[in-house]
Amino acid sequence: MKYSAELDPDKTAKAYGYELHCSRKDSTNLAYAIKGMKTEVAKKYLQEIINMKRPLPTIFHYKKRAHQKGIGPGSYPTKAAKYMLKTLENAENNAEYKGFDLENMIIAHISTYSGRVIKGIMPRAHGRATDKNTRTTNIEIIIEEVE
């Protein structure tokens, strides 16, 4: 696996979520929201989205999205937030293994993009079939220790 950004390995820890079964569009909005946050703040933010306490403002792909109170178009992408939280915790565990101070870690780079498409079919009447493909998402996170 290759990361789309190369940062100083003496200050950073990485994690990669490969072929996750969640929406790429929701993952992109989540990544935009938590980039640059401290890891503890980002974990709390993602947990509030999972518990449906705070809506995520939709910056990309906002057509036909319901407006949420006080933020405009938004939603509660709980499935994507669970996968993002799991990947962030993996990055924190890697940082702890490398001996970094977890209190001073920020999300330096986060990227989401389309993964593999899992082919499937749905049988229809008269011997026909319709595609029923499952799209996957890749998430990469690089956290960096700051002073």
Image: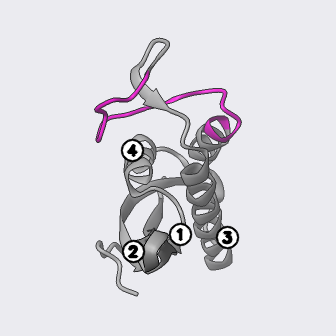
Q: Is residue 120 above or below residue 59?
A: below
Q: Which residues are magenta?
A: 48-66
Residues under numbered marks 4 and 2 in contact, where contact means CB atoms less than 8 Å apart: no
The three-letter code of the residue at mark 3 reads Asn
Q: CA distance from mark 1 to mark 4?
A: 16 Å
Q: Is residue 56 magenta?
A: yes
Q: Earlier in the sequence, mark 1 or mark 4?
A: 1
Q: Residue 20, which numbered label?
A: 1
Question: Is 96 left or right of 130, judged from the image as shown?
Answer: right
State the residue position of label 4.
29
State the residue position of label 3.
93
Q: Earlier in the sequence, mark 2 or mark 3?
A: 3
Q: Is residue 55 magenta?
A: yes
Mark 1 Cα shell of 10 Å, populated few (<14), some (14-19), many (≥20): some
Q: CA distance from mark 1 to mark 2?
A: 8 Å
Q: Residue 115, which numbered label?
A: 2
Q: Compare residues 107 and 23 and report the one nearer the observer.
A: 23
Mark 3 Cα shell of 10 Å, populated few (<14), some (14-19), many (≥20): some
Q: Residue 108, which numbered label?
A: none
Q: Quadrant of residue 91?
A: bottom right
The three-letter code of the residue at mark 2 reads Gly
Question: In x, y percent, where is residue 83?
Answer: 59, 60
